[in-house]
Amino acid sequence: MTQTLQPDLSGQTALVTGASRGIGRAVALALAGAGAHVLALARTVGGLEELDDEIAAAGGKASLIPADLTAFDTIDQLGPALAGRFSKLDILVLNAGSLGELAPVPDISATAWRRAFDVNVEANWRLLRSLDPLLRASDRARIAVMTSRIGGEQARAFWGAYAASKAALEMLAKTYAEETRSSKIRVAIIDPGAMRTRMRAEAMPGEDPATLPDPSQIAPLVFQAVSPDYDGVAERFVRQR
């Protein structure tokens, strides 16, 4: 695909999960820089406040949602709570994720397995369910789902919890995309590849982070996914390595 120039997102509302650091933070900054009012959701209050300061300094607008995605009762009420303030949701970026545990399948702890599926699958299902009315109220809602080659396309030893949960997330996204074909909602799946993030450092502790691209380089793919020209059904966007 050809790169999409920064779109004009003025008047649009965008919710980004895992927005306090890494790819989520980069996406939030990019969307705010394009004019969107960013609803930044993350557990880390300090990171959210720093993001808010940076967005405000650049003339953008953000609202902070300090929340744990595994607090399912809170996530279930997010849509109704936002509906009291916003009439629609134009962009949803499902970015937050959990690595789980890198171990042989028989050795993965039940706690790590459950955490991976709670964050990577169930939380996103609950977000889609809770935010669906606001998405349908938009005249062109776009959903970007962050995934990985490990899970959707390539199996790798010791990555069982992460890979299985990401594969489930991708199928969830594809199913929702099929169900919303007749609406104004469009879903894209984004594979950012290896980037300089905390999760990557946790998974590959011996890797030199200086050799990896900064998360800000994901912006062109995100702009493609949220563009009004995008009309795919869970099309996969892959950052060129």
Image (cartoon, helix red, strand yellow):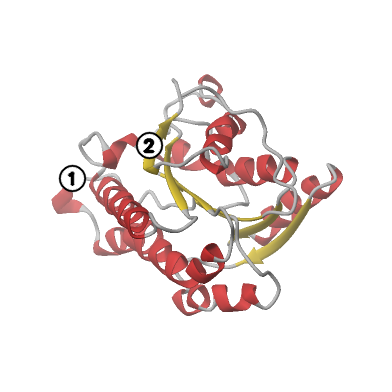
Residue 204 visible in the current orientation: yes
Q: Is residue 212 above or below residue 27?
A: above
**Residue 234 place in picture, x, y as percent:** 37, 45
For residue 237, side relative to residue 106 (left or right): right
Give the residue type at disc 2.
Arg
- Closest to the observer, 116 or 174: 174
Q: Residue at x 52, y 33 (%)?
A: 221
Q: Is residue 19 above or below residue 227?
A: below
Per the image, the residue denoted by label 2 is 236
Q: Residue at x 34, y 52 (%)?
A: 100
Q: Earlier in the sequence, mark 1 or mark 2?
A: 1
Residue 77 circle label: none
Q: Residue at x 57, y 66 (%)?
A: 137
Looking at the rendered image, the disc whose residue lies closer to the viewer, 1 or 2, is: 2
**Residue 11 place in picture, x, y as percent:** 74, 54
- Closest to the observer, 129 or 158: 129
Q: Residue at x 48, y 72 (%)?
A: 130
For residue 203, side relative to residue 45 (left or right): left
For residue 214, side relative to residue 205 (left or right): right
Name the quarter where the C terminus is drawn.
Answer: top left
Element class at badge 2: strand
**10 Å neighbourhood of mark 1: few (<14), some, or many (≥20)?**
few
Q: How far is mark 1 from mark 2, CA to CA?
A: 28 Å
Per the image, the residue denoted by label 1 is 104
Numbered circles on residues, count: 2
Q: Is residue 219 above or below residue 48?
A: above
**Residue 103 place in picture, x, y as percent:** 24, 45
Element class at badge 1: loop
